[in-house]
Amino acid sequence: MKKRARWTSLAGQGFELTAAVVGFGAVGFWVGGYLGNARIGLLIGAILGILGGLYNLIRSYLRALNRQSQVEQRESGER
């Protein structure tokens, strides 16, 4: 059961990264089209999406790492 929960968590994080890139890319394309250069807007939007998505991915990884270290400290204290 725990392996499946880990798998779904990783899939969710991958989907979140993809959604950030696609979402920011679409907004950048729309803004760029409005301003007269959709390609540059798409590029800027995609870069912002990658940066934001990676930030969230790293933040969730560090949170999970911190949780794991707290569990290990509790287990070592119980012995």
Image (spheres, helix red, strand yellow):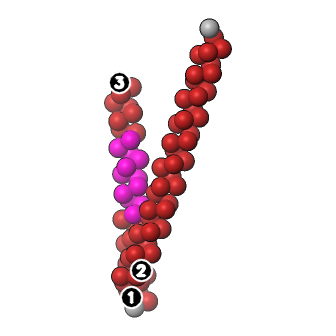
Query: Of the numbered discs in the image, which one, if any, rests on residue 9?
Result: none
Query: Helix, strand, or loop for circle 1?
Result: loop
Residue at screen point 40% across, 39% down: 9
Q: Check disc 3 and report the residue beneath it.
A: 1
Circle nearer the viewer, 3 or 1: 1
From the top left corner, tell me how far across and down residue 13 is, in percent. Answer: 41, 47
Q: CA distance from mark 3 to mark 1?
A: 49 Å
Q: CA distance from mark 1 to mark 2?
A: 7 Å
Question: Magenta stretch mostly in which secondary structure?
Answer: helix
Residue at screen point 37% across, 72% down: 26
The image quadrant of residue 37 is: bottom left
Q: Check disc 2 and report the residue beneath it.
A: 41
Residue flagged by tag 3: what amino acid is it? Met
Q: Check disc 1 and report the residue beneath it.
A: 37
**Magenta stretch, residue numbers:** 10-21
Q: CA distance from mark 3 to mark 2?
A: 44 Å
Which mark is first along the chain, 1 or 3? 3
The image quadrant of residue 4 is: top left
